[in-house]
Image: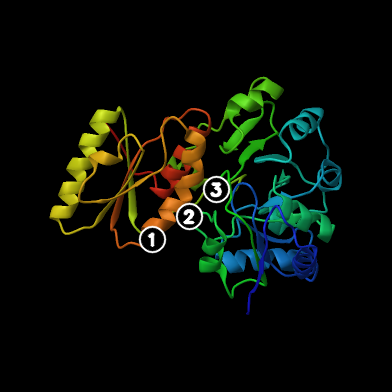
Amino acid sequence: MKTVILDMEENNLDSNLIKKGAQMIKNGGVVAFPTETVYGLGANALDTEAVQKIFKAKGRPSDNPLIVHVSSIDEVNPLVKALPKSAIALMKSFWPGPLTIVLEKSEKIPSVVSAGLDTVALRMPDHPIALALIKETLLPIAAPSANISGRPSPTKGEHVIEDLNNRVEGIVVGDDCHVGLESTVLDMTGEVPMILRPGGVTREALETVLGKVEVDPNLNSKEHTENKPKSPGMKYTHYAPKAKVIIIKGEESPVISEIKKMSQNYMDQGSKVGVLCFDETISNYQGVIAKSMGSRENLQIVASNVFRLLREFDKTDVDIILTEGVEEKEIGQAVMNRLTKAAAYRIISV
């Protein structure tokens, strides 16, 4: 399959290219496009055959549900059994934005989209290209991240081309994604709303609207791998670069000492070592390929850099990546969640 590349700037939309991408989706094709979180891989959410093409292109397990993207709150009603006032309040507060809401689905949503569950995950992206594409199709668009399943999520158009060129009908290349991590997924089907995946909208922000919000107790544990996932990103090893990743967490000084000791041990065994750290600590790591996620004081920037840096390590020949842990506050919880998945739960506390 020859992939058509549609190149445009988010501040200067090309209506002809938007129409071209939308037509591909209306014709049952699969098109990648930028959002504020990561690039998505979209197909008509109401067309079972089109959605199956997403799974095939990504190599994604079919029991992993997809997020359905809309361009207005009005588009949600036909897709759900009921729309609670609390969900509407969330949408008005955080949409468009990096929040996905899980509700009971209507019969319009095919089983393949929800992985056989009776729920559907819904989001309105905060990105002009994504919104223009959805509006032009006049369809809800099912879209997971636009990468080969298991790889770090794509935050640049070049990441998508690297993974999916000649595997999908179209790739809309825009600017880099500014959030850089997938959306928060909030399950609204229980008595108390529960975060199934942390992301760009924090628990603290959600609680300003809802009051009490719980976090899935197994968020960063292997328990998620045992069960049928209610949300994307719960069950399988995700976000992983080619090299083995190990997280070292604790106070700064012991973490630095442990990473230096482990680096030397690996190098003595003939391995090439990469270190993922911060602006404040990068000068401590010599003789390794060290990359900074940003300052500890700006976790928003750290979040936007993680997937890009994991992919950059793939262009080196490192065998092992040792990463400093991130403080699990606000969006730091989402960063740590993604690193934990990338490390396949290999964490050392010091």
Count of all numbered marks drawn on residues in the image = 3
Q: Which one is in front in this view, the residue at disc 3 or the one at disc 1? A: 1
- Name the outermost residue toward the bottom: 1
Q: Which residue type carries mark 2? A: Pro
Q: CA distance from mark 3 to mark 1?
A: 21 Å
Nearer to us of marks 3 and 2 is 2
Closer to the camera in the image, 336 or 289: 289
Residue in the foreground of this view, choosing between 129 and 57: 129
Marks 1 and 2 in Cβ contact (< 8 Å): yes
How would you rate the neighbour count of disc 3 (Cα within 10 Å): few for under 14, some for 14-19, many for 20 or more?
Answer: many
Residue 233 image label? 3
Q: Secondary structure at mark 2?
A: loop
Amino acid on which disc 3 is placed: Gly
Q: Residue 145 at x, y = what percent? A: 59, 55
Q: Front-most of 316 and 346? A: 316
Quarter holding residue 33: bottom right
Q: Which residue is mark 1?
A: 314
Residue positioned 59% across, 31% down in the render: 202
Point out residue 63 in the picture as x, y percentages from the top left corner. 60, 55
- Is 324 located above or below residue 63 in the figure? above
In the displayed structure image, the side of residue 52 where residue 61 appears, left or right: left
